[in-house]
Amino acid sequence: MAEVDVLATLNGFAKEVYGADPIDALPENVGYMLKNVKFREQDMLGNAFHVPVIVSDEQGITYAGADEDDVTLNESVAMVSRDASLKGTQIIARSTIGYKLAASVASQGKKAFANSTELIIKRLMKSAAKRIEVQMLYGGSGLGVLSGTNNVSATETELEFTAASWAPGIWAGQNGAVIEAYNGVTLIATLNVKKISDLRGAKLLVTGLAGDITAVDGFAFGTLDLFWGGAKGKEAIGLDKIATTSGLLFGIDNAVYDVFQGQRFDALSAPLSFDKLTDAVVDAINFGLDKNLAVLVSARTWQDLNKNEAALRQYDYSYKKNDAQKGNSELHYTILNVDVNIVAHPMIKEGEAFLLVPEDFRRVGAYELSMKNPGMGSDMFRERDNKTSFELRAYTDQALLCERPSHLIKIINIVNS
């Protein structure tokens, strides 16, 4: 058999199997935000993306009585537009294939290539997509607050989360992920995820150097929050931060412009009910909401709403009053002529929920998630320096923009039954 140019052959097979523009499409089941918030490529000015946002209506309005004539008009007061600026976060996911496997695959042809690489490529894209989804939810806010630890050994401990900040979907399948524990801006420990050790008890088993384990075990808990390794201060802000920021948001002062400030609704340390959700929707309607809403809730909150008879008037868009079926992951109903879609999202923390208008959001950035990396053309594989392996990468540069934060409501203090 003739000698195979392995790198060229792998990239050639990739173009045949996955197309000339390989793996640009987002993987399925990546999460609600990635699927429903469109990406718009945006040019950077300086080192940030700039988007004009209207923050106040035209106010040059004159009233005249029925018998008045030759009325003097009020001066025009133009609408106010402000420049929203935000920086995209770069996320890069990497995977490798050794020379031996690559040579074997290349020598056996296109079918062997497809069989051997499909799983790696799909997982690489899904892993990167999950990080983007988590960033769009909790970027800049943290992944969960610790309430305590249970030491296992010098290099292993079990983290206990507050019930309100526990989101199992963030941690499922993250074995080996690097996380950092912060007290405010102070890094306390760098750890590695091992597994979810207690799903209902909100516990995560982690490993680390003895010094890091000692540091996290000895901390006075209640303010210690977790971030992905290297993400703090670099990731773009998500729904949580947009909804709770008071002051400058995307460079616009929402203390001046009320339509650019998110809202909060208190569930008063009780389960989220249809009545409470209606109250929250009314708050958004009072700020001019006239579009369909999505409510992202944890699976446990969804269970409580599912038990509420008022929330079961429609099960999904195929609902028929004489042929309703249970078992869906979404609930649909109407409040004051606004269609509301309740979505169970495994990455939403169990003590909170988000009410939002998907159309009010866009993902802006220089590059949508793709394995066709900048500067590499359509080549998927590259040779690693000083290593006997080839590497694949998935890359994106993006951030989440909300054009009407007043229609975004964070529901807090949910205690599920």
Image (cartoon, rainbow, N blue to C red):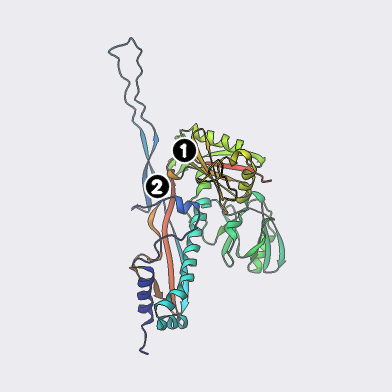
Residue located 44% across and 78% down the image:
112
Name the residue located 53 percent from the left edge and 47 percent from the top edge. Answer: 240
Q: Which mark is residue 316?
A: none
Question: Element under label 1?
Answer: loop
Q: Is residue 395 left or right of residue 73?
A: right
Cβ–Cβ under 8 Å for marks 2 and 1 = no
Note whether residue 265 is visible: yes
Q: How crowded is mark 2: few (under 14 residues within 10 Å), some or many (20 or more)?
A: some
- Tell me the amino acid under the disc marked 1: Asn
Left or right position of 196 against 44: right
Query: Farthest residue toward the front?
Result: 322
Question: How many numbered discs?
Answer: 2
Could you tell me which residue is drawn at 46 percent across and 61 percent down?
27
Against 415, residue 68 (above or below) is above
From what the image shows, is residue 318 above or below residue 209? above
Distance (Cα) linking label 2 and label 1: 14 Å
Label 1 environment density (alpha carbons within 10 Å; few <14, some 14–19, many ≥20): many
Q: Where is residue 2 in the image (x, y as percent from the top left)?
A: 35, 89
Query: Circle 2 sits in a helix, a strand or a loop, which is it?
Result: strand
Q: Which residue lies furthest to the top in this view?
A: 67
Q: Name the residue under label 1.
A: 254
In the rendered image, residue 238, in percent from the top left (x then y), is placed at 50, 50
Q: Which of 383 and 291 is in front in this view?
A: 291
For mark 2, what is the residue?
A: 85
- Is any atom of residue 384 visible in this view? no
- Residue 210, given in percent of the width and then of the height, sits at 66, 68
Image side of residue 177 versus residue 106, left or right = right
Q: For the residue marked with disc 2, what is the amino acid? A: Ser
Q: Which is more toward the observer, 6 or 403?
A: 6
Q: Earlier in the sequence, mark 2 or mark 1?
A: 2
Residue 207: where, in percent of width, then height? 64, 67
| 1 lies left or right of 341 | left
